[in-house]
Image (cartoon, rainbow, N blue to C red):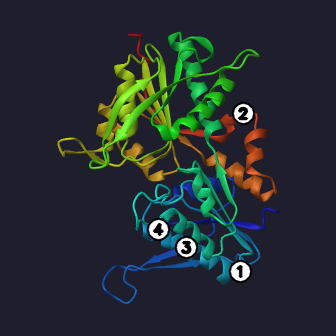
Amino acid sequence: MSSDDFVLLPGRPGDPFAREVARYLERGLCPVEFVEFRDDGGPMSGETKIEIRQNIRGKHAYVLWSVGFTNYELMQVLQLIDTARPSCGAISASLICPELPCARQDKTHERRESLSSRLVARLLEYVGLNEVMTCDLHSDQIEGHFRIPLDHIRTRPVWGHYIARRYKEWMSEYGLAPEGADLVLGVPDAGASRAVRELSDDVGRNLKTSAKKIKIQLCHHDKMRLWERPHEVQTHGLLGNVRGKVVWFSDDLLSSGGTLFAAAAAARANGARYVACSVTHAHGFDRTDGDGVLKSFAEALHESAIDELCVTDTHPRFLERVRKDPLLAAKTTVLSLTPLFGEAIQRLRSGNTIKEMMKEIPDYGRLYAVAHEPEPRPRVRPPT
């Protein structure tokens, strides 16, 4: 596919994800006009009209969309895809969406409960999409909801590279043991067990200095969620030795942070030297504490046992909050996955697979960039 055979369309007005991916690919975004009608009771009250202001006939359309998690924005992107295919004559269309909407509604817990992740898949198919690209789905079973190709990118090699990179910095600065001997990867809950176990292999591969295989130690946080209080988690214990160690918890999604805050507190209570957490999709909802007092996510993070929170920019609004809130920025590192998605789009254009891309790149540091880091970085505490 030549450079003139495709166009990049922003999935919503001013989407920073679309802008950064276009910059990485050294292309401009196709001009799209989003006309939003005021909710004034008129015949088009609250509606959006979309017009693609460029001829895209005979081209492949890549729709770049970082979701804002409202049904209104989902309707907008469905309108855009529907406009690109029959109206403008795009020969095919792909949706590049780092986090799919309704990903947590992937199974039913009660009768007569909506399975919204499947509904989203059906809607995207109906408007004429040819393929979808996303990363770190909340559960692998969502892949089965799609009857069109779904490229599910795993960011595990990226995190494996970054965690090893940070540990090497601490080795030289604070005298940590080589080859990850003072590192423990934490499993925040049972659902993350398999992913963290696989992550340990990636971290070990980046840390090893000899022919022997390195296995990073794991610890498991045993929790129970209080369903009557959705944002609260009850800790039953921490399985594994973390005393004097650097503990790094990893998960796919952060909503209010209840699970990670509880896991970090358990690690600190068991003598952890330093606690870091990494998540791919960060939202950081404000929450109420046990006394019903509303507390911002920034305040909750500041008061927690977490020394450093590492997130990606798959949810750009969280990055904006980091840039505007000094309290949130003080403990937060943001990795940009723009290079990862840019490389993936180039692979699709050349007819290669995403799976092979993750095997062929020798240095996973190429697939991310540090968009924000706290100044100064949190210090690794001395052993207790």
Q: Which residue is mark 4?
A: 73
* Mark 1 vs 3, N-terminal side: 3
* Mark 2 vs 4, N-terminal side: 4
Q: Residue flagged by tag 2: what amino acid is it?
A: Asp
- Structural crowding at the residue carrying mark 3, measured as other residues with C-alpha within 10 Å and reported as few (<14), some (14–19) or many (≥20): some
- In depth, the one of 50 and 351 nearer the eye is 351
Cβ–Cβ under 8 Å for marks 4 and 3: no
- Structural crowding at the residue carrying mark 2, measured as other residues with C-alpha within 10 Å and reported as few (<14), some (14–19) or many (≥20): few
Q: Secondary structure at mark 1?
A: loop
Q: Secondary structure at mark 4?
A: helix
Q: Which residue is mark 2?
A: 363
Q: Is residue 357 left or right of residue 258?
A: right
Q: Residue flagged by tag 4: what amino acid is it?
A: Glu
Give the CA separation, mark 2 to mark 4.
36 Å
In the rendered view, tell whether residue 114 sits above or below residue 42: above
- In depth, the one of 107 and 289 nearer the eye is 107
* Mark 2 vs 3, N-terminal side: 3
Give the CA separation, mark 4 to mark 1.
23 Å
The mark closer to the camera, 1 or 3, is 3
Residue lying at 59% horizontally and 19% vertically, measured from the top left: 168
Q: Position of residue 298 (x, y in %)?
A: 33, 40
Circle number at residue 78? 3
Circle number at residue 89? 1
Q: Position of residue 363 (x, y in %)?
A: 72, 33
* Mark 4 vs 1, N-terminal side: 4
